[in-house]
Image: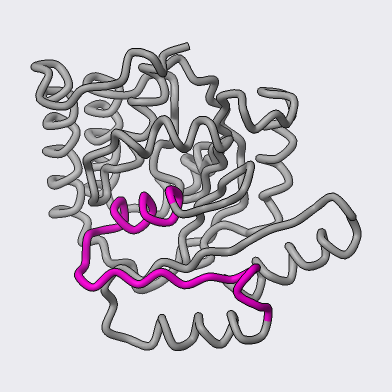
Amino acid sequence: MLDECLEYLESRRKAEKSFSYEVIVVSDGSRDKTVQVAQKYCAKHGTDRVRVLALVQNRGKGGAVRLGMLSARGRFLLFADADGATKFPDFAKLEQSMAQLCGNDHTRDAIAIGSRAHLEQEATAQRTLFRTLLMHGFHFLVWTFAVKKIRDTQCGFKLLTRSSARKVFAVMHVERWAFDVELLFIAQSYNIPIEEIAVRWTEIEGSKLTPFWSWLQMGRDLIFIWFRYAIGAWQLRKEHAN
């Protein structure tokens, strides 16, 4: 993923004088050589372009993404899964959508999210009946308790303006797999414009998700998200609503 990402960003930087970037690698308490490998990219490209943040303890995907997004210095902030399931050049599609949503003004609110919804029919044909039922059950819970009109909440390829990222990530609580849903729930509560963009996506072997237990945990987290905001245990900042 890093090679594809940096190759794309470097080509953009060389071709466009106004284009600049930074890449932040967040290690979520991993015990492998993630940090050491990422530091080699820092040495090669410079710490102004590649930075590494290492969490001492595992906080979950949501916690790692939140740290990275709140540490980012850019005007537009993209988070992407490290497995490379989404083709990084599809960033251009999100960028084009962002131009339409906010005129490329990072002080305005807008979110462009990668979506695999266009691949749903093909994916369903390859899944077992059990996994298909779990998927539809999760979508039903998302629609009922949290996010409306978004077909794919879980694609790990989302672009936010700096303004939107600061508003949304500052109040997030969920640190595990359902954090995407809370992100979009908060964004919709703030009336932030959101657009789904079809992206290329490839199934990557070695997923950390165990189908039944992961869907069960995310379903539980969805209900908790709705309940905690409903009773006021978690609160949004009214001044951020558009």
Above or below for 184 versus 3: above
Above or below for 237 versus 180: above
Q: Position of residue 226 (x, y in %)?
A: 17, 24
**Number of numbered labels in the structure image:** 0
Instruction: Examine the structure image and report whether residue 62 is included in the region drawn in magenta.
Output: yes
- Asked whether 173 or 201 is in front, the reply is 173
Q: Position of residue 10 (x, y in %)?
A: 77, 67
- Asked whether 28 or 157 is in front, the reply is 28
Q: Residue 138: which quarter of the image?
A: top left
Residue at figure coordinates x 52%, y 49% from the top left: 157
Residue at figure coordinates x 39%, y 43% from the top left: 154
The span picked out in magenta is 45-70
- Colouring used for the render: one colour
Instruction: Examine the structure image and report whether residue 69 is included in the region drawn in magenta.
Output: yes
Q: Residue 53: which quarter of the image?
A: bottom left
Q: Is residue 149 left or right of residue 177?
A: right
Residue at figure coordinates x 47%, y 72% from the top left: 52
Above or below for 240 versus 98: above
Q: Position of residue 45 (x, y in %)?
A: 68, 79
Q: Position of residue 170 (x, y in %)?
A: 34, 37
Quarter of the picture holding the N terminus: bottom right
Residue at figure coordinates x 40%, y 37% from the top left: 153
